[in-house]
Amino acid sequence: DPPPPPGPISFTGTKLVNDRDHPWRPLRKGDIRGPCPGLNTLASHGYLPRDGVATPTQIINACQEGFNFDHSAAVSATYLGHILNGNLVTDLLSIGGKTPKTGPPPPPPAHAGGLNVHGTFEGDAGMTRADEFFGDNHSFNQTLFDKFVDFSNRYGGGFYNLTVAGELRYSRIQDSIATNPQFSFKNVRFLTAYGETVFPINLFVDGRQTERKLSMDHAAAFFRDMKFPPDFHRAAQPSSAEDVEKVLEAHPWLPGNNADGQLNNYVADPNSADFTDPCSLHRFVIGSVQELYPRPTGILRRNLIKNIGYWYTAAFAPAGCPELLPYGQL
Ligand code: HEM
């Protein structure tokens, strides 16, 4: 059985996390990394299995322990990724590409393909990862990181902060509208794209530091090298997407996509999930899950019901969203 998610950690202050028990190590042959600099770093320091394949429980514990990522965000993001991209029979998720290490894949169209799968959790207009259309949606991209540095110089005095986040987020959207005919920026991606711009401020800044700004050395350590800076202390209180609304307010924008596969043809989608309706993400993802798993039986059905239930309880029950039960109850 997939176990229920672990609870919050007991000590939630800052502490040294780049410690002797969690040394950074270079990748070995076969180790998997993916589009998320947070999870990549946790794996390269051994907070997650170093091969990059983990259970939801391991991911939730590692994010809390290593970054002080708050419990509810950890459970919500982990089950979102696991339900869409994980192997629900073996309870294993790859933080990057598809691998036999997660066990036999489910019947198509489900894929258990890991976090690299485009259009599920991973999406367009990332800060340091290129769009799938250009051929690699998950590796660190130096050209994009140069833009990250340039914007930090222009808007943040050489540091990444909330002002930079607002400008860079908007500019990356405009880049994709102009260059990616397949550009899609709605539902899961609309929400995560904004959230990810504040994670570097809330979680990559040393917890002993009072100014909320990230140096370029430290940014390169996380995004490129998957490494905590020397002596890195995690956030001083449980944190996740605080101030995400300020990034959207800097350049208000609607979910949508380049229609008809045409450049410079961004059309808003009024049916997309967004920040105004906290239940919209749940409805959208349950719809996607039903497409992936039209008629699950046996262990697969049981585990779908359990995982969807764990996700609902953490992410949507607190907002009073109606519970959707696409596969009934156990
Ligand atoms: C991006 C998954 C936790 C920081 C991503 C992406 C995925 C992902 C799939 C790629 C989205 C895209 O840009 O297309 C997850 C999952 C988590 C998690 C399943 C489970 C809890 C964290 C944590 C941090 C973090 C704890 C920070 C400490 C980031 C950042 C990006 C990102 C900064 C943006 C990368 C960029 O745009 O260049 N994450 N993540 N994530 N994640 Fe995570």
Image (cartoon, helix red, strand yellow):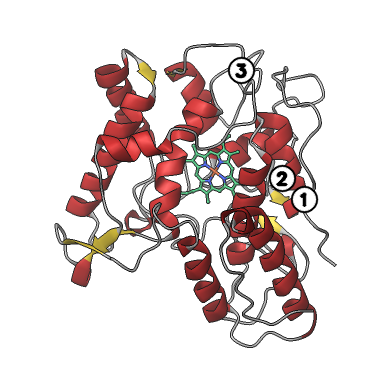
| Residue sitting nearer the eye, 231 or 312 | 312
Question: Could you tell whether 190 is left or right of 40 in the image?
Answer: left
Residue type, mark 1 in image: Thr
Residue located at (75% from left, 35% from top)? 46
Q: Residues within 10 Å of mark 1 (few under 14, many from 20)?
A: many
Confirm or reject: label 3 Cβ below 8 Å from ligand 1: no
The reply, left or right, for residue 208 in relation to residue 90 is left
Ranked by sequence position, the earlier of labels 3 and 1 is: 1
Label 2 beta carbon within 8 A of ligand 1: yes
Q: Which residue is drawn at 69% across and 82% down?
A: 328
Secondary element at tag 3: loop
Asked if marks 1 and 2 touch (Cβ < 8 Å), the reply is yes
Q: Of label 3 and label 2, which has the lower sequence position? A: 2
Any mark on residue 283, and which? none
Residue that carries the numbered disc 2 in the rendered image: 60
On the image, the x and y values in percent for residue 96 come to 58, 52
8, above or below 254, in the image: above
Disc 1 and disc 2: Cα gap in Å?
5 Å
> According to the image, label 3 marks what residue?
207
- Residue closest to the far front: 320
Q: Where is residue 64 in the image (x, y as percent from the top left)?
A: 70, 36
Q: Is residue 195 above or below residue 209?
A: below
Q: Is mark 1 on a helix, strand or loop?
A: helix
Type of residue at label 2?
Ile
The disc placed on residue 57 is: 1
